[in-house]
Image (tube, coloured by chain):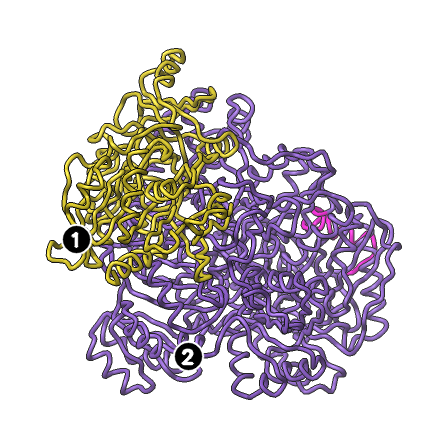
């Protein structure tokens, strides 16, 4: 059926703040869907409370509502836009679906004559209700686990008695598997059962036979209104059943499945989709396969776009959300064109001629006391994807993307050599199991033992074992003697120059020079084209590998590279992707060819429609450098991609590559507390007393002159990592020892902590001569809580003129003194009406997107034009929409870590944020958080 | 780890150097690529690939070894294989052995560790051509060229009578209610499995069997199989098919069988630029409006213009990428055929309904 022309105005529901289990993949799908609908001449109104999203930008939708995701907000929107005739709830994760169901139950859609498209409520219900799902699977002949649903404690115990142990508890209607658990022994059962019943909003759990250790797969499927179906991607979990798929290392295409088994699974997926209801869009189906391939069990079906569909889109190039939106308005798959080739049908199954490996990124260090073992409930905060021509290359590239101070898998001297610890880790997977599998092989633990304990498929294990053989071979040589053939082999298996340097005991630069200049072993770039090169592709989406043919042709246009922010983590989330995307769009407006480099598959920045060229590569020195050698850009923008991009500035500068905007020197000056304080002193800007130390002896000496309480903070860290307030010498010494253990050779700052001070921060754009302050935000909690974790109000709610004047003056002084070209963020502490500068970050901060949304002005766009030298600050007319106050609400994921108390301090812990507008300070919401401002402060 | 080297030389002079896989030696054929990501063993044993060197575009081959149950003919008849990354080790509990051993056993020579994507892009733009793989002429390009020149041109090549069964054989339950005479041009076993599963007893006849011999078995319907080579030079099969059509009994053709049916109805065939080979080909059934993902392997195709003008046949299926004819039926007769592989081994099972259609025709008769 062609497009349904009765749909003229669609309401799109976003997924709200970033929490574990629901991250920026929904910004990607939502903004893609919105563009897809508007392409068809349909008006789009969007609701999302997350300001740091591209989807809530005026560039994305016709009307944007930054309102809480609740029924009340929907009613308000529908009252203001009576012409909205349809709602698309499948692009905003579980949050959007739940809200749509809530509105359906409340009769909202009916009342306003809005119909739900892309899904039907029965389908959601069947997919989410474990009992219904199971009954349906049994009816259509798809295998399911033995088990039953319990709505009471007693019922749960009866079921467990019937199926025996080990078993699994799954709570109904929860995000990312919250409330789920494995129960190995009867004695653990009762506690976990009541936890599961409580976690479920409907107090319902499914208790099932355990299929731990089975192989786990996902199929990303699309279906249209007449039942045409295609599988976009098969994804195989490296970690077998037992680890939540969001916490599993996953690989596409499936590596160990014969066609016979794969087709059985595909048939099941089709039957399952057809049976749950008549819906059009993307769908994710999960399966477990017994190790001998004989049995296939349907685990779950999600009739909406998901984290996995974002991954599948990036893995294959097939824009699932874009097509899903078209299907929702009536098109059939065979009526659409594959936008990647521009010539062939969208009704086809992508064929890929490379391998992708996704590795989740965890942040257990932020949740002290958390259970670090992986299980049924998702704990990862982000993910990276590596693309290579073989599994090993993709695996190494993914490891290089993680930013966990590793250079890839192995060959960096950081192996764990304790047999007992290794065996424990293999049996109790955590964030480092992959590395420990490698370490176990390296230590000589037998293949059989590793396989018996981990149940990881033999083929994957062999691939890792083989890496060690290659390393052994390389270690026989020196940099002068290594044969080109071996070097080529190592590079083809994804080894970084740094890893090879470690094996050859030489410098990274020596390896680079040898292979690149002497041996001519250079990266080539291949296209992600959905079709394994069968057709010519139009979309400039590249990855690097080592081969004969380079498909990336370099244009003669002036170009700029924007470095992305890598995997999401606490302290560096979607805000930086927002800035990167706007940087790209602004540079495009200035006539630049834009080149994006990033490795996070969840993001909008890695949507190949955004930049002129996307290199899906680790934000890791050698990958970036080779792209620069190939593209020869005018320069690189580092100030939009958070610390990830910023920390590469030094090396770029050293290699004579131009940094667009604020120079490396200034970036470094701002980080170097000693030099920065001299600068403040010269400019007569007050700051808390401080000193730098390198060991405990110096610390104990220095504390005498500065005086307690002290704020201890390591240099060059993200989101206040390792920061702590200490009140006596004992605490000080303890913490300095801890910091130096985690971050050896770090310079540590001791600041006098201004107890009870008020905190504020300012963001500004500077062109080197003129400064424009885009916003000043006042924190609600007192000093001591990381700015990312504080409620903050824009503009300040109770700072006097005198204080405001100091903030403004200091902001301007510092911006100019640092010769800032672009964005700068400055943090202040205010005590007794005196303003102290705590730190300055000459880059896009976490608050910039928030201010852009609250004031409805495109500041990142302006800043980028300033950075590029295309515009001066004075060229812009600033007209911020100032009405009432905007409150930034930090959002936490503590519910994922039941043993961790919500305790806030100088180290950031929130995973996301929401925006909330109030008219005046008598607002109940404001008064409540203001009253609770001291509640969670720890030291 | 020191593996023997191998060379791939294309008819236009392009050379790739890589590692030898399978059996050492020299072998040539027409080079083509398949974009499927599963089912290498089924592809290698598909008789339609006789005389062809198969490039698989997927990154890894050999991962799950080989298993006796998943062959499409008794032994592979391909001229060679080209892969990106070849797994010497495999993971499958019920496998019968490694792909390497299987290739050696059947004397198949292959090459790995080359930039297969570059090769595919080359074939995509230059079209199908002959090639030779060798582990013996590493430093002797002239010698290798001589070997390449010995490879026959696929245009005008008749291969069915070579690869088909030499003696008739039976498949399925002899007490089944329906009997189908299968004309073997290089039949895939999964076609027979699909027929047998639907209560059909098959007798498979050599390609050059006459209509009289087929008819002597008194079948309820006729099946025209897939197979290698150029349909334009198979007058014997076209002749037989014309007689079959006159009998009025149900006829079903797949791939080469489809091309033969078209020829028998006066529709010509031609060689495509580089063919369709993969498991992801989009087909629309123009009768039902539903679309299906199909498994394909063909280098020749029937002429669409002639089909559209024809009084004898009509188009039932169309390829959504290039709009070539993917299926026809004979007007007023229970005879139909598809260019693709509904038995799909390997590949999606979306088109299995065609076997049901065939069987229901015979029930009606």
User: At 67% from the left edge and 47% from the top edge, which residue is drawn?
Assistant: A638
Asked whether disc 1 touches disc 2, contact meaning CB atoms under 8 Å apart, the reply is no
Magenta stretch, overall SS? helix
Task: Answer with the quarter of the image where residue A326 lies.
Answer: bottom right
Relative to B198, B335 lies left or right = right
> Percent from the top left, x then y, of residue A664?
71, 43
- Element at label 1: strand
- Kindly identify the residue that appears in the image at 63 percent across and 53 percent down: A642
- Toward the left, the furthest residue is B175
Q: Which chain does tag 2 point to?
A: A
Query: In the rendered view, does A732 fall on the left or right side of B47?
Result: right
Q: Return the chain for callout 1.
A: B
Residue B54 is tagged as none
Provide the residue designation for mark 2.
Answer: A199
Chain A: what color?
Answer: purple
Cα–Cα gap, marks 1 and 2 = 58 Å
Crowding at dot 1, Cα within 10 Å, few <14 / some 14-19 / many 20+, comes out as: many
Disc ID at residue B201? 1
Whether A903 is among the magenta residues is no
Q: Position of residue A763 (x, y in %)?
A: 75, 61
Q: Nearer the viewer, mark 1 or mark 2?
A: 1
Chain B, which colour? yellow
Q: Which stretch appears magenta?
A: A667-686
Nearest the viewer among A857 and B365 is: B365
The answer to whether residue B308 is left or right of residue B165 is right
Characterize the local packing of mark 2: few (<14), some (14-19) or many (20 or more) Cα atoms within 10 angstroms.
many
Figure quadrant of the N terminus of chain A: bottom right
Q: Position of residue A357 (x, y in %)?
A: 44, 49
Residue A716 at least partly seen? no
Say whether residue A751 is visible. Answer: yes
Percent x, y of residue A760:
73, 68
User: Is A672 part of what is drawn in magenta?
Assistant: yes
């Amino acid at each position: 059926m062609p497009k349904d022309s009765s749909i003229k105005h669609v309401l799109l529901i976003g997924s709200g703040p970033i929490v574990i289990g629901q991250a920026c993949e929904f910004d990607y799908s939502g903004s893609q869907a919105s563009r897809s609908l508007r392409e068809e001449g349909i008006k789009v109104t969007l609701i999302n409370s997350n300001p740091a999203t591209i989807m809530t930008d005026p560039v994305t939708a016709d009307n944007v509502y930054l309102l809480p995701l609740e029924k009340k907000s929907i009613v308000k929107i529908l009252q203001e836009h009576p012409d909205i005739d349809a709602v698309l709830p499948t692009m905003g994760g579980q949050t959007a679906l739940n809200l749509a169901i809530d509105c359906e139950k409340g009769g909202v859609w009916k009342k306003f004559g809005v119909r739900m498209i892309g899904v039907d409520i029965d389908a959601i219900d069947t997919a989410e209700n474990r009992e219904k799902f199971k009954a349906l699977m049994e009816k259509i002949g798809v295998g399911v686990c033995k088990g039953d649903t319990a709505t009471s404690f007693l019922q749960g115990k009866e079921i467990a008695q019937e199926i025996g142990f080990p078993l699994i508890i799954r709570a109904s209607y929860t995000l990312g598997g919250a409330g789920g658990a494995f129960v190995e022994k009867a004695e653990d059962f009762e506690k976990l059962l009541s936890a599961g019943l409580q976690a479920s909003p409907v107090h319902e759990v499914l208790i099932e036979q355990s299929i731990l250790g089975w192989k786990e797969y996902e199929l990303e499927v699309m279906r249209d209104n007449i039942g045409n179906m295609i599988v976009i991607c098969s994804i195989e979990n490296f970690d077998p059943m037992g680890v939540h798929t969001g916490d599993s290392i996953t690989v596409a295409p499936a590596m160990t499945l014969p066609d016979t088994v794969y087709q059985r699974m595909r048939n099941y997926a089709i039957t399952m989709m057809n049976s749950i209801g008549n819906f059009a869009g993307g769908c994710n189906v999960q399966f477990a396969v017994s190790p001998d391939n004989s049995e296939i069990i349907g685990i779950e079906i999600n009739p909406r776009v998901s984290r996995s569909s974002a991954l599948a889109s990036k893995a294959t190039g097939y824009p699932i959300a874009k097509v899903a939106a078209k299907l929702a308005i009536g098109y059939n798959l065979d009526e659409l064109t594959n936008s990647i080739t521009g010539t062939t049908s969208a009704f086809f199954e992508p064929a890929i001629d490379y391998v992708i490996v996704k590795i989740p990124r965890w942040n257990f260090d932020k949740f002290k006391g958390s259970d670090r073992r992986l299980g049924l409930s998702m704990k990862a905060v982000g993910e990276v994807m590596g693309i290579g021509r073989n599994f090993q290359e993709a695996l190494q590239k993914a490891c290089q993307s993680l930013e966990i101070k590793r250079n890839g898998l192995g060959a960096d001297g950081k192996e764990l050599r304790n047999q007992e610890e290794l065996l424990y880790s293999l049996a109790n997977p955590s964030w480092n199991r992959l590395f420990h599998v490698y370490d176990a092989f390296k230590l000589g633990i037998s293949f059989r033992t590793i396989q018996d304990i981990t149940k990881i498929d033999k083929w994957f294990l062999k691939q890792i074992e083989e890496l060690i053989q290659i390393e052994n071979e390389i270690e026989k040589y020196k940099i002068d003697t290594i044969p080109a053939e071996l070097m080529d082999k190592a590079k083809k298996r994804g080894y970084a120059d740094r890893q090879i340097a470690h094996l050859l005991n030489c410098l990274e630069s020596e390896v680079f020079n040898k292979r690149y200049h002497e041996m001519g072993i250079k990266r080539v770039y291949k296209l992600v084209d959905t079709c394994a090169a069968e057709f010519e592709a139009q979309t400039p989406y590249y990855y690097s590998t080592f081969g004969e043919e380079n498909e990336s042709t370099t244009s003669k246009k002036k170009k700029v590279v924007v470095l992305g922010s890598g995997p999401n983590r606490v302290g560096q989330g979607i805000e930086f992707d927002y800035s990167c995307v706007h940087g790209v769009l602004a540079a495009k407006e200035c006539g630049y060819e834009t080149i994006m480099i990033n490795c996070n598959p969840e993001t909008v920045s890695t949507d190949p429609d955004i930049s002129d060229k996307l290199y899906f590569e680790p934000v890791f020195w050698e990958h970036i450098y080779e792209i620069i050698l190939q593209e020869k850009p005018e320069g690189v923008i580092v100030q939009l991609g958070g610390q990830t991009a910023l920390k590469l500035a030094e090396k770029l500068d050293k290699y004579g590559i131009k940094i667009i905007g604020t120079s490396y020197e200034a970036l470094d000056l701002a980080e170097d507390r000693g030099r920065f304080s001299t600068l403040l002193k010269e400019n007569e800007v007050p700051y808390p007393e401080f000193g730098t130390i390198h060991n405990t002896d110096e610390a104990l000496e220095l504390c005498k002159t500065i005086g307690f309480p002290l704020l201890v903070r390591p240099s060059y860290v993200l989101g206040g990592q390792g920061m702590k307030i200490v009140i006596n010498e004992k605490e000080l010494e303890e913490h300095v020892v801890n910091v130096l253990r985690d971050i050896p050779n770090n310079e540590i700052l001791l600041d006098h902590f201004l107890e009870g001070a008020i905190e504020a921060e300012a963001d500004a754009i500077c062109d080197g001569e003129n400064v424009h302050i885009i916003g000043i935000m006042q924190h609600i909690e007192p000093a001591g809580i990381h700015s990312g974790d504080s409620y903050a109000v824009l503009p300040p709610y109770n700072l006097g003129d005198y204080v405001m004047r100091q903030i403004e003056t200091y902001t301007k002084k510092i911006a100019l003194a640092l010769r800032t070209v672009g964005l700068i963020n400055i943090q202040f502490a205010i005590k007794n009406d005196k303003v102290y500068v705590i730190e300055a970050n000459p880059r896009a901060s976490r608050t910039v997107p928030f201010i852009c949304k609250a004031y409805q002005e495109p500041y990142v766009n302006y800043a980028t034009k300033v950075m590029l030298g295309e515009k001066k600050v004075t060229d812009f007319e600033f007209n911020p929409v100032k009405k009432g106050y905007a409150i930034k609400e930090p959002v936490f994921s503590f519910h994922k870590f039941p043993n961790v108390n919500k305790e806030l301090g100088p180290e950031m812990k929130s995973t996301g944020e929401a925006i909330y507008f109030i008219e005046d300070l008598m607002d109940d919401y404001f008064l409540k958080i203001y009253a609770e401002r001291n509640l969670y402060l720890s030291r | 780890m020191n593996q023997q080297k191998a060379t791939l030389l294309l008819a236009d002079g392009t050379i790739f150097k890589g590692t030898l896989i399978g059996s050492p030696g020299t072998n040539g054929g027409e080079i083509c690529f398949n974009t499927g990501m599963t089912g290498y063993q089924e592809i290698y044993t598909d008789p339609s690939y006789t005389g062809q060197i198969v490039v698989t575009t997927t990154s890894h081959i050999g991962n799950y070894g080989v298993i006796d149950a998943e062959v499409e003919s008794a032994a592979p008849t391909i001229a060679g294989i080209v892969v990106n990354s070849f797994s010497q080790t495999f993971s499958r509990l019920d496998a019968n052995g490694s792909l390497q051993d299987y290739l050696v056993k059947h004397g198949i020579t292959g090459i790995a560790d080359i930039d297969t994507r570059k090769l595919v892009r080359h074939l995509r733009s230059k079209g199908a051509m002959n090639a030779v793989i060798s582990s013996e002429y590493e430093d002797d390009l002239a010698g290798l060229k001589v070997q390449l020149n010995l490879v026959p041109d696929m245009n005008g090549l008749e291969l069915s009578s070579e690869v088909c069964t030499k003696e008739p054989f039976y498949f399925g339950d002899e007490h089944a209610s329906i009997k189908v005479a299968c004309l073997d041009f290089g039949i895939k076993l999964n076609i027979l499995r699909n027929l047998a599963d639907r209560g059909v007893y098959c007798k498979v006849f050599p390609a050059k069997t006459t209509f009289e011999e087929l008819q002597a078995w008194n079948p309820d319907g006729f099946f025209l199989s897939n197979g290698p080579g150029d349909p334009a030079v198979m007058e014997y099969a076209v002749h037989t098919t014309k007689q079959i059509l006159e009998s009025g009994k149900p006829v079903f053709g797949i791939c080469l069988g489809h091309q033969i049916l078209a020829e028998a109805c006066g529709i010509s065939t031609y060689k495509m630029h580089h063919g369709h080979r993969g498991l992801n080909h989009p087909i629309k059934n123009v009768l039902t409006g539903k679309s299906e993902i199909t498994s394909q392997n063909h280098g020749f195709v029937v002429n669409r213009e002639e089909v559209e003008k024809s009084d004898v046949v009509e188009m039932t299926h169309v390829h959504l990428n290039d709009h070539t004819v993917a299926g026809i039926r004979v007007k007023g007769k229970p005879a139909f055929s598809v260019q693709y592989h509904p038995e799909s081994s390997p590949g999606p099972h979306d088109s299995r309904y065609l076997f049901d259609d065939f069987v229901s025709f015979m029930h009606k008769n």
